[in-house]
Image (cartoon, rainbow, N blue to C red):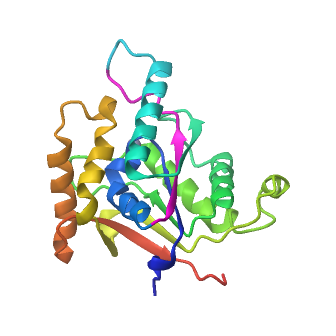
């Protein structure tokens, strides 16, 4: 049984600036509209995502940070936390797990969205970025058990961060989806948010692309525009 209407706080843990807007901007816009406080946790510094020979990593980091903050403003996201790990080198280390657990304990989300921890070989067009798998694995391990257990990462307790139990995790995994969120009312906001990532989208028609993508996702459930996830619900008394 889900009781999503009672959620007050959400978190999105992703590897890169733009991952959240590509994957779940409609859900985030819906949550923000409902009055939920949403925080983004970005694992990497975005320093590698360009094929422009004239741009340096430090210039790119600044550009992508600004783009992500602009996208967050469009959606109504409360805060963007940048963990600053090197782009394209992300590993699901204990350090990354602890850093995500710290943000979970600090912001106390009822629900967390993260990427899939496994490589998806479905289809032929996209093989998946290793950072996405690393961020997904680290986020899941931070939710359970690191954020929940008092004696794990005792340095967090010393920082005054008490354990926190997340109630639900939504994994961005369309092929194994069991949860569809209707984003039809906020599709224009989702498009506007993705458009903020100008350095990443180039000439691509964002409005057309996102409408097609969300429409395809909604089709099995007869929803005009949807985002789909694999959900895990935790018992509150776990
Ligand atoms: Zn990415």
Taking the spot 31% from the left edge, 66% from the top edge, the residue there is 228
Image spot of residue 28 (x, y percent): 40, 59
Is 42 above or below relative to 152? Answer: above
Taking the spot 40% from the left edge, 50% from the top edge, the residue there is 20
Query: Which residues fall within the magenta stretch?
Result: 35-51
Taking the spot 40% from the left edge, 34% from the top edge, the residue there is 67
Is 72 above or below relative to 66? Answer: below
Image spot of residue 98 (x, y percent): 69, 52
Image spot of residue 143 (x, y percent): 61, 64
Q: Quadrant of residue 30?
A: bottom left
What is the total number of numbered labels drawn onto the structure image? 0
Q: Quadrant of residue 23?
A: bottom left
Q: Quadrant of residue 91?
A: top right
In the image, farthest residue toward the right: 158
Is 147 above or below relative to 100? Answer: below
Taking the spot 39% from the left edge, 51% from the top edge, the residue there is 75
- Indicate yes or no whether the magenta region holds residue 36: yes
- Indicate yes or no whether the magenta region holds residue 188: no
Quadrant of the frame with the C terminus:
bottom right
In the displayed structure, does residue 69 sit left or right of residue 126? Answer: right
In the displayed structure, does residue 212 sit left or right of residue 27? Answer: left
Compare residues 76 and 153 and report the one nearer the observer.
Answer: 76
Image spot of residue 114 (x, y percent): 47, 58
Instruction: Give the image quadrant in which the ligand numbered 1 is located.
Output: top left
């Amino acid at each position: 049984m889900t009781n999503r209407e009672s959620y007050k706080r959400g978190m999105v843990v992703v590897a890169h600036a733009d991952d959240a807007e590509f994957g779940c901007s409609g859900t985030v816009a819906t949550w923000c509209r409902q009055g939920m406080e949403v925080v983004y946790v970005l694992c990497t510094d975005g320093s590698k995502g360009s094929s422009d020979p004239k741009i340096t990593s430090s210039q790119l980091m600044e550009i992508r940070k600004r783009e992500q903050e602009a996208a967050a403003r469009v959606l109504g996201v409360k805060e963007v936390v940048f963990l600053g790990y090197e782009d394209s080198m992300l590993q699901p280390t204990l350090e990354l797990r602890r850093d995500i657990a710290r943000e979970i304990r600090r912001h106390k989300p009822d629900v967390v969205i993260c990427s899939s921890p496994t490589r998806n070989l479905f289809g032929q067009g996209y093989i998946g970025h290793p950072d996405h798998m690393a961020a997904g694995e680290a986020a899941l391990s931070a939710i359970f058990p690191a954020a929940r257990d008092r004696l794990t990462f005792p340095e967090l307790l010393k920082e005054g961060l008490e354990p926190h139990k997340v109630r639900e995790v939504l994994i961005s995994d369309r092929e194994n989806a069991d949860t569809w969120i209707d984003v039809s009312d906020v599709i224009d906001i989702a498009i506007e948010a993705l458009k903020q990532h100008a350095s990443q989208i180039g000439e691509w028609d964002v409005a057309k692309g996102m409408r097609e993508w969300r429409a395809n996702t909604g089709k099995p459930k007869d929803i005009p525009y949807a985002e789909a996830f694999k959900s895990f619900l935790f018992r509150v008394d776990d």
